């Protein structure tokens, strides 16, 4: 097969869900496949840090708008002068050309803009509302990241279920158990944090339910005499003042730390050192951070909604994230019951080991073959 992939997200959005997915997909296809021929479209003048095999070719996209694809729904000439059996756009189909000359497949991670439009950026919401039906109608197949998302996509777009392929994601190799003392020293040196802490990583969107987490944590602070902190990691965007003000309103501002963006290479320190990881999201197509935490040997409290139970199984303490009392009780439980916490850590490490990017790549390659046979 002659396979073309839009790889721009692997450069522009590395560290986000879509960027990590695109990067690891290309890397893992490179690991497992030396038979099919690949053309990977990348931004002009950007170098790619994966050493690609001889069956992979980088094709520069000459016209790139402001280093992002949200301004450019359709790249009309991207497949000109390129032989292709199938073209894959990993970032929810954004950038798929409307002129069709081969089989088209997109990875549609979820339908959050339909379910929770108030939690999505204006540009992406506009694209989803105005263009996604047309994008889907051009597709010969859709790849998604969970059975939950498959059901949502099929219902939302009346798309045949047998043409939707589920390829679960995985944690990256950087996430693994490390020496806890060394990690604590690194965090103190780079962030000035000495105290024990509970950790949240995963973005500041309203659907992530950070307000609910702060309210539950405030209950814990009232009854817990420890100097434990809550770290909420992520870029301080437009939502940050709301969360900071909420911590002040609840009287816990001295217990909540917003360190800002945490680089990929620093995240394992935090996962390894936290008392436990909390992920009270209201809606996920997959949800990578809990798996990353498990890979590092952290116990996890997570939402029991949407795709999260499918991904985590019984390896996490699943709670209704809309119930702050239930979330609070789960946190108290993990702080007080070390035996239970150790059991969750053991289960989490085992659960994480069932996911791998090479398996994601194998299932993606199988999807390509099935789509090309249609």
Image (tube, helix red, strand yellow):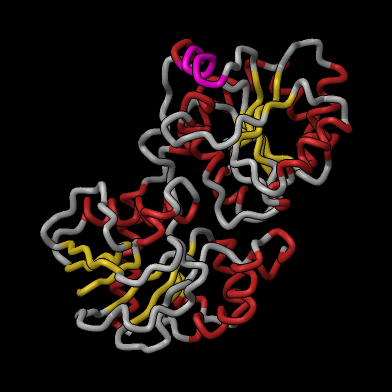
Which region of the structure is painted magenta? 183-191
Residue 34 colored magenta? no
Q: Is 303 situated above or below 270? A: below
Q: Quadrant of the C terminus?
A: bottom left
> Residue at the location (63% across, 16% down)?
339
- Determine whether 25 is above or below 126 in the image: above
The image quadrant where one finds the N terminus is bottom left
Using the rendered image of the protein, determine whether residue 149 is visible from the camera's viewpoint: yes
- Residue 184 magenta: yes
Task: Tell me: 216 left or right of 352.
Answer: right
Type of secondary structure dominating the magenta stretch: helix
Residue at 84% from the left image edge and 30% from the top image edge:
248
* Apparent side of residue 41 relative to residue 336 in the rendered image (left or right): left
Query: Residue 41: x and y, percent?
Result: 29, 67
The residue closer to the viewer here, 321 or 199, is 199
Residue 304: in sight, yes or no? no
How far from the left and from the top, in percent, is residue 98?
Answer: 42, 86
Residue 213, by quadrant, is top right
Nearest to the observer: residue 57 or residue 122: 122
Q: For residue 128, which quarter of the picture?
A: bottom right
Q: Quadrant of residue 42?
A: bottom left
Name the residue located 41 percent from the left edge and 29 percent from the top edge: 176
Camera-nearest residue between 268 and 264:
264
Q: Is residue 344 above or below residue 61?
A: above
Q: What is the x, y in percent for residue 202? A: 59, 43
Q: Position of residue 303 (x, y in %)?
A: 69, 44
């Amino acid at each position: 097969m002659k396979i073309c992939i839009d790889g721009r997200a692997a450069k522009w959005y590395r560290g986000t869900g879509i960027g990590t997915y695109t990067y690891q997909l290309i890397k893992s296809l490179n690991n497992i496949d030396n038979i099919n021929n690949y053309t990977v479209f990348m931004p002009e003048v950007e170098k790619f840090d994966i050493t690609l095999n001889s069956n992979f070719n980088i094709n520069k996209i000459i016209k790139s708008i402001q280093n992002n694809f949200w301004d450019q729904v359709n790249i009309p000439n991207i497949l000109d002068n390129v032989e292709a059996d199938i073209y894959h756009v990993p970032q929810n189909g954004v950038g798929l050309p409307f002129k069709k000359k081969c089989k088209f497949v997109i990875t549609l991670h979820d339908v959050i803009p339909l379910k929770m439009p108030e939690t999505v950026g204006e540009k992406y919401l506009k694209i989803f509302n105005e263009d996604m039906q047309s994008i889907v109608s051009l597709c010969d197949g859709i790849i998604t990241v969970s059975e939950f998302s498959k059901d949502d996509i099929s219902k939302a777009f009346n798309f045949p279920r047998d043409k939707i392929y589920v390829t679960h994601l995985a944690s990256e190799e950087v996430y693994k158990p490390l020496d806890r003392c060394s990690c604590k020293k690194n965090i103190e040196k780079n962030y000035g944090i000495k105290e024990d802490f509970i950790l949240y990583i995963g973005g500041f969107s309203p659907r992530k339910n950070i307000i609910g987490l702060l309210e539950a944590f405030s209950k814990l602070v009232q009854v817990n005499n420890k100097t434990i902190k809550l770290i909420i990691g992520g870029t301080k965007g437009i939502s940050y003042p709301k969360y900071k003000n909420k911590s002040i309103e609840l009287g816990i501002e001295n217990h909540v730390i917003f360190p800002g963006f945490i680089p990929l290479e620093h995240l394992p320190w935090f996962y390894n050192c936290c008392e436990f990881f909390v992920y009270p999201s209201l809606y996920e197509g997959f949800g990578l951070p809990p798996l990353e935490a498990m890979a590092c040997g952290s116990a996890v409290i997570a939402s029991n909604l949407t795709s999260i139970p499918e991904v985590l199984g019984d390896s996490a303490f699943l709670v209704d994230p809309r119930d702050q009392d239930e979330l609070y009780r789960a946190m108290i439980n993990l702080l007080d019951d070390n035996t239970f916490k150790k059991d969750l850590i053991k289960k989490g490490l085992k659960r994480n080991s069932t996911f791998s990017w090479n398996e994601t790549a194998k299932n993606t390659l199988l999807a390509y073959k099935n789509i090309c046979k249609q």
